[in-house]
Image: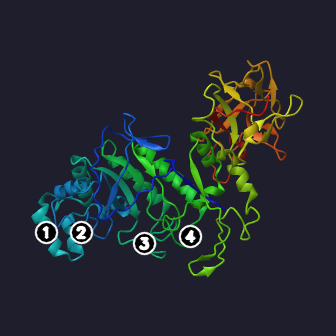
């Protein structure tokens, strides 16, 4: 139930549209490389850069960017810019960089193999300098021409075997398909990322276009997309990595089933957002009377919540953590648990810390010495023994009072038990805050870290607790 639609969308994923017959204001790009600052893509000076891209096809059987038999390459690049686009999503097939026989073909040879003699004549007339270059050199020449005209490039791995995309049965749809060997794909991404390392107008790499077909599944998506992203980043850390969803890139809904990370970011950035939809059923929709709305907050009778657990998860995001109208004189942290939507709080000094509504959360300070203390008191968060409740103490100089944010997620809060063993903040079945052995610190896709994920969220929200 429920799809979160954000007015301010996070840049973990960049969605690039295909434009046609559009004239928009010309954009000029400043300093490379690009990076992300919170939800924004920014240049080296910290200024926002909005990608307005158009697709240029270069993944079909000939493996030469389309149109070069019709117009000079530089003229096409200038035309792209004059239409207001600042970016090209330039497609490529994996086999271009992993199959040496194909990659070493010249443009002339590739056209000859496919009987396209008229195209050879056209390229000789319009782009004679590339006709006898290798296909890889032609691809690089296109990127260079775009760069000369101040057009950014996203290298889009569109397919493995060159050809038109896409169908469920073309052998290119998902990891393990006939032409989609994950290891070969990783090799291709690595080689392409390395090839364009240091080329400033190559600002991003799209790992794969429109994943699809009967073999698609969420576990392999997580496994291989992570490997692909790591391979690209290792070979070329200057490019933004762009991921594709499932079902022809129309479905990222599975992320809500593993949301700890995403809800943590939503709390940290304190977005504005809208949830689709209140409606439990419709009078008339698409010719159907009384159609059930499965994304509805309410059931089909408009009486009960469809999914109270989901409503609890998002409850902490329904009120602002900070901003105009809230006291700026009371900055503090709350310890947010994304998978439940609750925060760490105490009922009294005699009871253990528990998860509860964030409106009743403690106000915490997080010092440069990594101490988490209750604001306005001498009490700090401390560990005890494994599987024992975390506690509040007043001697805050020992190792069991220092909390590091560890793991790639930076959402494991780690300290030392009384015997010196590393532990992480965790939650037991009663929502009591405990210290347990840290889990899921290695890249193990079978491990679920969400119970041990906590986010330190900036807040000026007043607490009802004393």
Image coordinates of residue 231 in percent, x first then y, are: 46, 49
For label 2, count other residues whose C-alpha is less than 10 Å away and answer few (under 14), some (14-19) or many (20+): many
Question: From where the camera sits, is residue 237 visible?
Answer: no
Q: Which residue is mark 3?
A: 166
For label 4, count other residues whose C-alpha is less than 10 Å away and answer few (under 14), some (14-19) or many (20+): few
Q: Which mark is residue 215?
A: 4
Dot placed on the residue nearer the N-terminal end, 3 or 2: 2
Tell me which residue sits at (10%, 65%) in the image. Answer: 125
Q: Closest to the observer: 3 or 130? A: 3
Q: Which element is circle 1 on?
A: helix
Mark 4 vs mark 2: in front = 4
Q: Which element is circle 2 on?
A: helix
Q: Are marks 1 and 3 in contact (CB under 8 Å)?
A: no
Image coordinates of residue 434 in percent, x first then y, are: 80, 37
Q: Which residue is mark 1?
A: 122
Tell me which residue sits at (13%, 57%) in the image. Answer: 129
Q: Which residue is mark 2?
A: 110
């Amino acid at each position: 139930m429920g799809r979160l639609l954000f007015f301010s969308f996070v840049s973990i994923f960049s969605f690039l549209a295909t434009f046609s017959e559009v004239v928009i204001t010309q954009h000029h790009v400043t300093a490379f490389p690009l990076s992300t600052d919170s939800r924004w893509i920014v240049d080296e000076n910290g200024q926002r850069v909005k990608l307005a891209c158009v697709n240029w096809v270069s993944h079909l059987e000939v493996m030469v960017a389309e149109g070069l038999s019709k117009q000079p390459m530089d003229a096409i690049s200038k035309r792209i810019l004059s239409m207001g686009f600042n970016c090209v999503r330039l497609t490529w097939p994996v086999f271009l960089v992993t199959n040496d026989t194909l990659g070493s073909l010249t443009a002339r040879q590739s056209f000859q193999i496919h009987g396209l003699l008229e195209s050879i004549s056209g390229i000789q007339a319009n782009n004679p300098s590339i006709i006898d270059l290798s296909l890889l050199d032609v691809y690089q020449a296109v990127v260079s021409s775009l760069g000369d005209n101040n057009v950014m490039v996203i290298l889009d791995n569109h397919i493995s075997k060159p050809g038109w995309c896409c169908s469920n049965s073309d052998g290119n749809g998902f990891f393990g398909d006939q032409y989609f060997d994950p290891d070969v794909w990783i090799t291709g991404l690595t080689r392409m990322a390395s090839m364009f390392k240091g080329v400033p107008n190559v600002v991003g790499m799209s790992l794969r276009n429109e994943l699809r077909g009967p073999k698609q599944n969420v576990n392999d998506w997580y496994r291989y997309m992570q490997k692909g992203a790591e391979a690209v980043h290792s070979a070329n850390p200057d490019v933004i990595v762009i991921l594709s969803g499932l079902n022809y890139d129309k479905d990222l809904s599975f992320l809500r089933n593993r949301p700890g990370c995403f809800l943590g970011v939503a709390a940290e950035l304190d977005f504005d957002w809208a949830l689709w939809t209140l409606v439990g059923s419709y009078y008339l929709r698409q010719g159907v009377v009384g159609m059930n709305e499965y994304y509805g907050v309410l059931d089909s009778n408009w009486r009960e919540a469809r999914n109270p657990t989901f409503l609890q998860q998002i409850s902490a995001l329904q009120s602002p953590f900070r901003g105009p109208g809230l006291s700026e004189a009371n900055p503090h942290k709350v310890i947010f648990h994304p998978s439940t939507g609750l925060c760490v709080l105490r009922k009294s000094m005699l009871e253990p810390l528990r998860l509860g509504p964030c409106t009743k959360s403690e106000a915490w300070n997080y010092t440069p010495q990594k101490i988490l203390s209750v604001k306005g008191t001498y009490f700090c968060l401390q560990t005890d023994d494994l599987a024992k409740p975390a506690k509040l103490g007043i001697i805050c100089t020992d190792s069991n009072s220092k909390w590091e944010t560890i793991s790639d997620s930076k959402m494991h809060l780690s300290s030392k038990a009384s015997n010196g063993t590393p532990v992480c903040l965790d939650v037991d079945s009663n929502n009591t805050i405990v210290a347990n052995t840290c889990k899921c610190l290695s890249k193990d896709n079978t491990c679920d870290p969400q119970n041990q994920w906590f986010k330190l969220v900036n807040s000026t929200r007043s607490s009802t607790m004393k």
